[in-house]
């Protein structure tokens, strides 16, 4: 448990991490970081405040000379404050965002931005998303904030041209969380711009754990180093404790691997629900899972080719699929689009693939309330004449679950899809999609 006298300074984030010992301050204030154990700065709020004074003049965004000089002075003062704080063992968490550059009315060669308050060399690029891939599971900030099961994280900038340690990337490997360690024991964290928790108590628990780690770091720092020769003197208890520590550490690492494996399996299972809730890339990813579950090799398409999915199987079968998530029933345009993908595949390989149209119809309704047909009669007739198989998102979900429980069913289900011209029969039960009653508050 952390020391309740530890203090947090929140800069330009008044509703963040509310607890005893929290002080709110704005970037422009004279409140220094020196008295605090943890400082959190919300960069986007400061950026927005500065831009309330902007003027649009030609292709340069400028502010008047007096305001420019004032802002430049404030940024320099904060930079000196942050640098002194970090060089003396402080912990600074910055929730980063892309920052605007401003000029004064007369000098376009001296741009400024709130990012200049940080001395480290890095640039911030525009970009946002919600997929966060942690790279350092042992770091307390990663553990407490970025990988916390009760938090939701959204990055609003990518971090480039830096020499810090990468803590997290997005799905394609662009850096979105970075750590710098200072010689004086301080730590600068550049984190995604939005970190929110489901409930206040979840936030408080995460902050308590984080502060406990910071306090531990401070306690360790106060102890002087023992002389080198002390390593040659080991008591029986120290030897015994070291062995116990090594055993515990080995068990911890095994448990950590097991935990991550279980978390990944859970996340994958939860994401399967996107087949009957989602649209766009959500359902497309689910259809890839479907084709892989049936034993297919999904062939990545070049960017110039907009075909949703192509999968080839050991049985020499090939499936070309179109995936859609829609608010109502399937429309004719999706069948026409599938015609195009099937035609392109035939033109390239001189082989006719099986066309598969997966539609998550009535997506905004709960599964049990979807009383209307996803595929109207004229769509079924069209698919039958073309030799296409029609499948709902719920059917795709159930097929993946069925193959997961009984792997040998994959070939039988694949053959059934190949043999079906029109709507696929079966696999539309809601038995495995249960409605869980909300627990009382």
Image (tube, grey):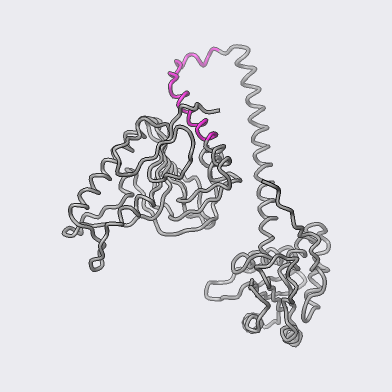
The residue drawn where x is 81% and y is 66% is 429
State the residue in front, 368 or 379: 368
In the image, residue 402 lies in the stretch drawn in magenta: no
What's drawn in magenta, residue-wise?
Answer: 208-233
The residue drawn where x is 27% and y is 57% is 53
Residue 261 position (above or below residue 273):
above
Tell me where residue 149 appears, x and y as whole percent: 61, 46
State the residue in front, 334 or 361: 361
Tell me where residue 179 appears, x and y as whole percent: 44, 42
Farthest residue in the front direction? Answer: 441
In the image, residue 230 lies in the stretch drawn in magenta: yes
Tell me where residue 274 appears, x and y as whole percent: 66, 62
The residue drawn where x is 56% and y is 76% is 305
State the residue in front, 409 or 435: 435
Main SS category, magenta section: helix
Q: Give the quarter of the figure containing the N terminus.
A: top right
For this view, does 107 lie left or right of residue 251?
left
For this view, does 247 lie left or right of residue 5?
right
Farthest residue in the left direction? Answer: 106
Residue 72 position (above or below residue 391):
above
């Amino acid at each position: 448990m952390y020391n309740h006298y530890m203090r947090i300074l929140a800069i330009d984030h008044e509703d963040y991490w509310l607890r005893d010992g929290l002080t709110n301050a704005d970037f422009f204030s004279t409140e220094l970081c020196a008295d605090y154990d943890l400082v959190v700065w919300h960069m986007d709020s400061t950026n927005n405040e500065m831009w309330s004074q902007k003027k649009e003049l030609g292709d340069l965004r400028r502010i008047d000379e007096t305001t420019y000089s004032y802002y430049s002075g404030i940024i320099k003062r904060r930079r000196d404050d942050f640098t002194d704080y970090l060089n003396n063992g402080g912990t600074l968490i910055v929730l980063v965002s892309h920052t605007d550059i401003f000029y004064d009315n007369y000098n376009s060669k001296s741009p400024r931005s709130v990012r200049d308050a940080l001395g480290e060399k890095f640039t911030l690029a525009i970009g946002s998303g919600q997929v966060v891939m942690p790279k350092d599971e042992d770091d307390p900030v990663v553990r407490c904030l970025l990988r916390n099961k009760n938090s939701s994280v959204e990055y609003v900038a990518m971090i480039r041209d830096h020499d810090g340690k990468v803590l997290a990337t997005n799905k394609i490997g662009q850096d979105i969380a970075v750590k710098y360690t200072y010689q004086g024991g301080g730590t600068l964290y550049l984190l995604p711009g939005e970190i929110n928790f489901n409930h206040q108590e979840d936030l408080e628990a995460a902050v308590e754990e984080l502060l406990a780690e910071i306090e531990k770091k401070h306690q360790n720092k106060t102890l002087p180093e023992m002389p080198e020769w002390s390593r040659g003197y080991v008591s029986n208890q120290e030897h015994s404790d070291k062995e116990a520590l090594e055993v515990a550490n080995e068990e911890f690492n095994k448990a950590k691997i097991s935990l991550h494996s279980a978390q990944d399996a859970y996340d994958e299972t939860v994401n399967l629900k996107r087949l009957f809730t989602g649209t766009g890339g959500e359902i497309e990813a689910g259809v890839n899972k479907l084709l892989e579950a049936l034993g297919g090799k999904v062939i990545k398409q070049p960017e110039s080719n907009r075909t949703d999915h192509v999968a080839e199987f050991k049985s020499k079968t090939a499936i070309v699929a179109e995936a859609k998530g829609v608010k109502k029933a399937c429309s004719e345009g999706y069948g026409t689009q599938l015609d195009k993908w099937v035609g392109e595949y035939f033109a390239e390989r001189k082989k006719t693939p099986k066309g598969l149209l997966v539609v998550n119809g009535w997506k905004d309704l709960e599964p049990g309330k979807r009383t209307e047909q996803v595929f109207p009669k004229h769509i079924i007739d069209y698919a039958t004449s073309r030799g296409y198989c029609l499948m709902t998102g719920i059917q795709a979900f159930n097929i993946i679950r069925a193959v997961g429980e009984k792997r040998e069913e994959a070939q039988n289900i694949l053959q059934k899809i190949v043999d079906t011209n029109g709507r696929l029969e079966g696999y539309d039960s809601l038995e495995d999609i249960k409605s869980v009653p909300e627990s009382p508050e």
